[in-house]
Amino acid sequence: MNVMKMFDLSGKVAVITGAGNGLGYQFAEAMAEAGADVVCADIDMVNNEVTAARVEALGRKVLAVKCDVTREADVASLFQSAEKAFGHVDIAFANAGIADLAPQPLHDYPTDNWNAVIAVNLQGVFYTDREALKIMVRQKSGKLINVASMWGLAGASSVAPIPAYNAAKGAVVNLTRELALEYATQNIQVNAICPGFFRTKLAAGAYDDPEFVAAITAFTPMGRVADASEIKGTALYLASNASSFTTGLLLVTDGGCMAK
């Protein structure tokens, strides 16, 4: 196959949770730019409709669905709607996530914050992966992409103590490995993106704090925070035929942080 055609997603359908903001918006735009139709899912329908409008402007079909990934029924309904609208689901990004709500050491950590982070960042991935795989197993094909974090591979307290986020993303990393093995013979590739510091709204205004930006810039070997759009190439590789013999990969995009 021609190398450029490996990245062509024409005729494919991609479902993206957390599509309304940040990296989710970039995933949706990247899929549409490569030729895929897109199902945008988010609890925030105002921003989700903005993403959907961008996909439509790129000439692709789009379905915008309100979905709270902590609700099992919402996620099941999302994939049922996607399959009803398009007939198949070829790519799924389990992307919806929240930042740690109360960075502090574990002995002071509030139970409510722990439960909230785990509910979105781990339970939400479980629900998304399970519903996507139900369709992909029937099809005997699919690309499942979990959004983990570099903090799923190492402790974060050298920057900030975020135990719930670390625990959830570490679990997503190993869930990705497990699913890659479970479905390796069924033409389904399961991989994870492990981003470093990308400028998004995930951290609730943290990127507007000069001290925080200075600290993470100093921590990152490349000496800068990534623009959100820099995730698009990583996403396209894992969503396309370019990664047809790649499964169980933790694709770290962190400006060199985990190389330390």
Image: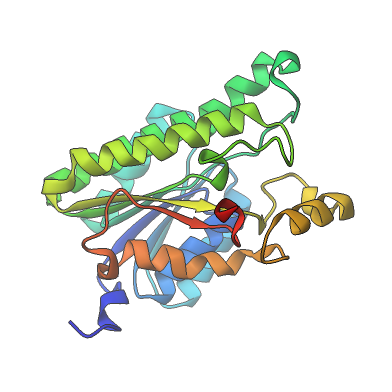
**Image x and y of residue 129, in percent:** 33, 39
> Residue at (60%, 27%) from the top-left corner?
164
**Image x and y of residue 251, in percent:** 43, 56
Please indicate whether residue 57 sits to the left or right of residue 246 in the image.
right
Q: How many marks?
A: 0
Please indicate whether residue 139 sits to the left or right of residue 101 in the image.
left
> Residue at (49%, 29%) from the top-left corner?
70
**Image quarter in which the N terminus is found:** bottom left
Rendering colour mode: rainbow
126 shown above or below 148: above
76 shown above or below 243: above
174 shown above or below 82: above
**Image x and y of residue 165, in percent:** 60, 33
- Which residue is more in the foreground, 215 or 113? 215
Please indicate whether residue 169 sits to the left or right of residue 203 in the image.
left
- Please say whether residue 69 is visible from this viewpoint: no
**Where, by quadrant of the figure, is residue 178 drawn?**
top left
253 shown above or below 32: above
**Image x and y of residue 155, in percent:** 61, 36
> Residue at (32%, 44%) from the top-left corner?
79
- Which residue is more in the foreground, 158 or 82? 158
- Please say whether residue 73 is visible from this viewpoint: yes
> Residue at (70%, 51%) from the top-left corner?
201
Q: Given the current orientation, which residue lies at the most extreme right position?
A: 210
